[in-house]
Image: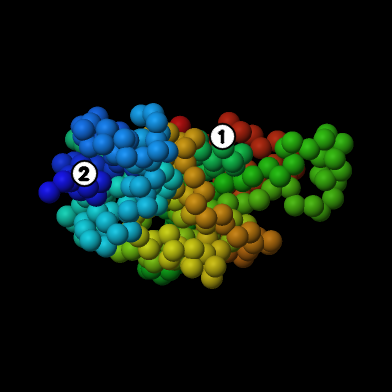
Amino acid sequence: MAKSLSDFIVQKLLAEKEKRLTARQIAEWIFENEQEWCARKKERSAAISTDSELIQQLVAEIGSQRPALQKRYSKIKTTAERPKKYYWSDKSEEEEVADALDQAIDAGSSKSVSEADMYPILSKYLRDELGVYSKRIDERKSSNSLKSGSNQWLYPDLVGMEDLFSSWDDDVQRLVKETSHQHASLWSFEVKIKVNRSNLRQVYFQAVSNSTWANFGYLVAGEISGNDTMSELRMLHGLHGIGVIQLDVENPSESQILIPARERSDIDWATCSRISKENRDFRDYLQLVRQFYQTGDPRKERWDKGTGE
């Protein structure tokens, strides 16, 4: 029986279990290894005259066949970012999250990435792409003065500040400084190695809990997988407003805001006060914000201190 495109997709994913491959990578592999099949496909189509057009057609067909493939083969999984990546995994979603955490603490693995490794990468992305100055909040620097468990989900992993008028005319900047106009937006970030349906609600509501004080709150993930994960995240965003960033740890500039956070117009200063009393990193963060309001200078060299850069 002649093989079909879906047969080739399954063959490739099975041969490299757990490896994330884009539709283009799969298409290029088919073109290189199934030349007779590709030649016949090219001959049968009046719309395909070049090899590059054939590969592009394969990419489109792989994308269109994805829902049927995943319905037929439950072990074919995809990531949420663009371009979407395909992989074959025998693990459950719970096992995938557990393995990601295990690999992160495996010092012998050259490919392991821990949440701590992600902080400076996120910091670079925020500064270079979004103009947000960031600072790491280390929960180990907390006083824990309140009763046990009272600080659970209180601290974000990173906080940030966006200078709202850095590109404005100098005269306008001086005028704004003399008024009560908001000078900056405050941001909060909860960082996770992997998000799928098994841990989605836990990590999302952790981000909700520790960002109640900020103008913008984000859940940041190194990988987001699962067919319905993004749909669930969009539904939760509609209710709670937390945004989602997919962080490309190998190339930070390729990171994406998958869901923009919904802005809160006012800072919750009561919560800021509580966090500040409990954690000196957050207290330093508020001092940097205060200095910015006083001087108009974000003191760039101080913001990334503690993120690993």
Going by the image, does 121 lie left or right of 287? left
Residue linked to disc 1: 128
Q: CA distance from mark 1 to mark 2?
A: 40 Å
**135 with respect to 60 (left or right):** right
Q: Is residue 30 shown above or below 261?
A: above
Q: Nearer the viewer, residue 165 or 256?
A: 256
Which-is-in-front pick, marks 1 and 2?
Answer: 2
Q: Quick one: label 2, few (<14), some, or many (20+) residues within 10 Å?
A: some
Q: Amino acid at mark 1?
A: Asp
In percent of the image, x 75 and y 52: which residue is there? 182
Location of the C terminus by quadrant is top left
Residue 23: give x, y in percent of width and height. Answer: 34, 42
Determine if residue 223 is in view.
no
Q: Is residue 260 left or right of residue 121?
A: right
Number of numbered discs overlaid on the protein picture: 2
Q: Pointer 1 and pointer 2: residues touching (CB < 8 Å)?
A: no
Q: Earlier in the sequence, mark 1 or mark 2?
A: 2
Residue 269: percent from the left, percent from the top?
Answer: 64, 62
For image coordinates 23% across by 31% down, the residue present is 35
Query: Mark number for residue 8?
Result: 2
SS label for mark 1: helix
